Image (cartoon, rainbow, N blue to C red):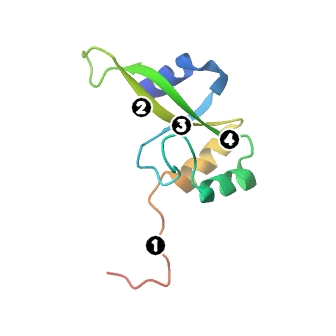
Amino acid sequence: MIDIVKAVQAADPSLGTYVIVLRNDSRALDGPERFTPDAQAWLAANAPGGRLARVTIQLAPYPGAAPAERAVSVAAFAEARELAAFATTWTGDPLPDESEDPI
């Protein structure tokens, strides 16, 4: 993961220090280039310095392999606090609703 972040920061230094690369199936994404409406609302309220970018990087699929071009979705933040709050809220599995019956 550190290699991906370093590659993103090298490819687009304007993103700054506080970035997180999102998986294609991230529940915060509504396609590779936009946040879901819920994630956009959350960002407006909790991380106004946050933005989404699509970055093309060179990355080896495994150690020793030749690097290949890969486009990734990147959430970038103005502050570490914003990144941490976003990661806590949007990158983990959602908590089950307390009103749901346990399985």
**Given contact means CB atoms under 8 Å apart, are the residues at marks 4 and 2 in contact?**
no
Q: Which residue is mark 3?
A: 20
Q: Amino acid at mark 2?
A: Met
- The disc at residue 79 is none
**Given contact means CB atoms under 8 Å apart, are the residues at marks 1 and 3 in contact?**
no
First-in-chain label (4 vs 2)? 2
**Given contact means CB atoms under 8 Å apart, are the residues at marks 1 and 2 in contact?**
no
First-in-chain label (2 vs 3)? 2
Q: From the top left corner, tell me how far across and down residue 82 is, in percent.
A: 67, 44
Q: Residue at x 58, y 20 (%)?
A: 12
Q: CA distance from mark 1 to mark 3?
A: 24 Å
Q: Amino acid at mark 3?
A: Ile
**Circle 1 Cα neighbour tier, 10 Å, few/some/many (<14 / 14–19 / ≥20):** few
Q: Secondary structure at mark 2?
A: loop
Q: From the top left corner, tell me how far across and down residue 77 is, in percent.
A: 66, 37
Q: Residue at x 45, y 50 (%)?
A: 26
Q: Which residue is mark 4?
A: 50
Q: CA distance from mark 4 to mark 2?
A: 20 Å
Q: Which residue is mark 1?
A: 96
**Circle 3 Cα neighbour tier, 10 Å, few/some/many (<14 / 14–19 / ≥20):** many
Report the mark closest to the observer, 4 or 2.
Answer: 4
Viewer-closest of 76 and 32 = 32
Q: CA distance from mark 4 to mark 3?
A: 11 Å
Relative to 81, residue 69 above or below: above
First-in-chain label (1 vs 2)? 2
Q: Which residue is mark 2?
A: 1
**Circle 4 Cα neighbour tier, 10 Å, few/some/many (<14 / 14–19 / ≥20):** many
